[in-house]
């Protein structure tokens, strides 16, 4: 049995993916109390409201007690490293979050789990704090790569940094089955959501609590009708453009009123659950080769 602790767990996307991949997550740890309900409602794991900086290796080892193998997983807040953070100047306001990657490394050193996995934005690799984290993984075989999520049948184009570390020999992600160079088998936005019931503005699906449509003003309804598939607010007539987008500071944000092209991939759909399911399969495969 593999017991996992998910630090910086948020509402549990990473936990859900690992669980889908066959990993037993026993606890998710985050300082935000608002995450407790969605985390525990959607995962068979206990939520710990705690700042990771106050966590010790002994506490992690206690959570792993009784398991054959241990896994420490985490996605430290990415705002300081992301493209959005650099573009908006959030790096300076989020400096205190840089140290959370180092805290992750401290917990690995104190608890010495059998396996470690980290998921984050690719830009993290260019920062010294990441190099320090990898250098501290002494005694581990390390696999680190930028994952193109389209190759794992996720209908979005965002790429993710995935690190795997094992104390039991080499470990790698399961190879993808989709050949993106040939554009064969790729998922699309339409394929992912076309089964959902069509909704008018302000409606909700009584059979799906997560499927609802915002109540829109007449102006925003006009904007949506004027939007082209794959287009942005830049396609609108002048009288539809919001005042904030007419200013120089707003001109660089075309995605705010962007419209998806159903037959293409999209950048805003989150791939974490499926990617971490693949991580779970990779760890189980590594353990299977030990037996």
Image (cartoon, helix red, strand yellow):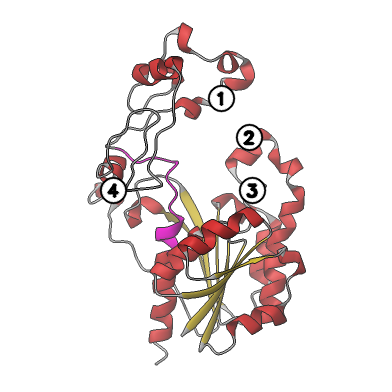
Which mark, residue 207? none
Circles 2 and 1 in contact, beta carbons < 8 Å: yes
Q: Is residue 173 visible?
A: no
Residue 223 drawn at (x, y percent): 41, 17
Which residue lies under the disc numbered 2? 87
Q: Quote the CA–CA distance across marks 1 and 4.
A: 28 Å
Which range of residues does the magenta coloring cover?
A: 264-276
For label 1, the SS is loop
Q: If you read the primary sequence from the N terminus, does the residue marked by circle 2 or circle 1 appear first? A: 2
Q: Residue at x 43, y 71 (%)?
A: 280
For label 4, the SS is loop
Q: If you read the primary sequence from the N terminus, does the residue marked by circle 3 or circle 1 appear first? A: 3
Q: Residue 241 in magenta? A: no
Q: If you read the primary sequence from the N terminus, does the residue marked by circle 1 or circle 4 appear first? A: 4
Residue 53 drawn at (x, y percent): 75, 65
Which residue lies under the disc numbered 4? 187
Q: Quadrant of residue 193?
A: top left
Q: Residues within 10 Å of mark 3 (few under 14, many from 20)?
A: many
Which mark, residue 252? 1
**2 vs 4, front mark:** 4
Circles 2 and 3 in contact, beta carbons < 8 Å: no
Which residue lies under the disc numbered 3? 81
Q: Quote the CA–CA distance across marks 2 and 4.
A: 29 Å
| In the depicted structure, whether residue 217 falls above or below residue 163 | above
For label 3, the SS is loop
Circles 2 and 4 in contact, beta carbons < 8 Å: no
């Amino acid at each position: 049995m593999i017991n996992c602790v998910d630090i910086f767990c948020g509402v549990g996307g990473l936990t859900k993916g690992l669980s889908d991949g066959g990993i037993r997550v026993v606890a998710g740890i985050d300082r935000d109390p608002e995450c407790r309900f969605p985390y525990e409602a959607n995962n068979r794991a206990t939520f710990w409201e705690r700042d990771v900086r106050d966590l010790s290796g002994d506490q992690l080892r206690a959570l792993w007690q009784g398991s054959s193998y241990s896994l420490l997983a985490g996605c430290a807040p990415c705002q300081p490293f992301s493209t959005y953070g650099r573009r908006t100047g959030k790096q300076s306001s989020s400096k205190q979050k840089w140290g959370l990657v180092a805290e992750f490394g401290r917990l690995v050193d104190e608890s010495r789990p059998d396996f470690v996995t980290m998921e984050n934005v690719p830009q993290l690799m260019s920062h010294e704090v990441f190099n320090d984290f990898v250098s501290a993984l002494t005694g581990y075989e390390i696999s680190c790569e930028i994952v193109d999520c389209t190759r794992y049948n996720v209908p979005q184009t965002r790429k993710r940094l995935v690190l795997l570390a094992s104390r039991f020999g080499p470990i790698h992600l399961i190879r993808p089955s989709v050949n993106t160079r040939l554009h064969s088998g790729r998922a699309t936005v339409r394929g992912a959501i076309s089964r959902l019931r069509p909704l008018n503005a302000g409606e909700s699906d009584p059979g799906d609590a997560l499927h609802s449509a915002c109540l829109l003003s007449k102006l925003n309804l006009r904007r949506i009708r004027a939007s082209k598939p794959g287009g942005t607010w830049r396609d609108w007539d002048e009288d539809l453009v919001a005042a904030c987008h007419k200013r120089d500071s707003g001109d660089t944000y075309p995605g705010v009123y962007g419209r998806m092209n159903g037959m293409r991939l999209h950048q805003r759909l989150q791939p974490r659950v499926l990617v971490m399911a693949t991580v779970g399969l990779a760890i189980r495969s590594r353990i299977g080769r030990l037996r």
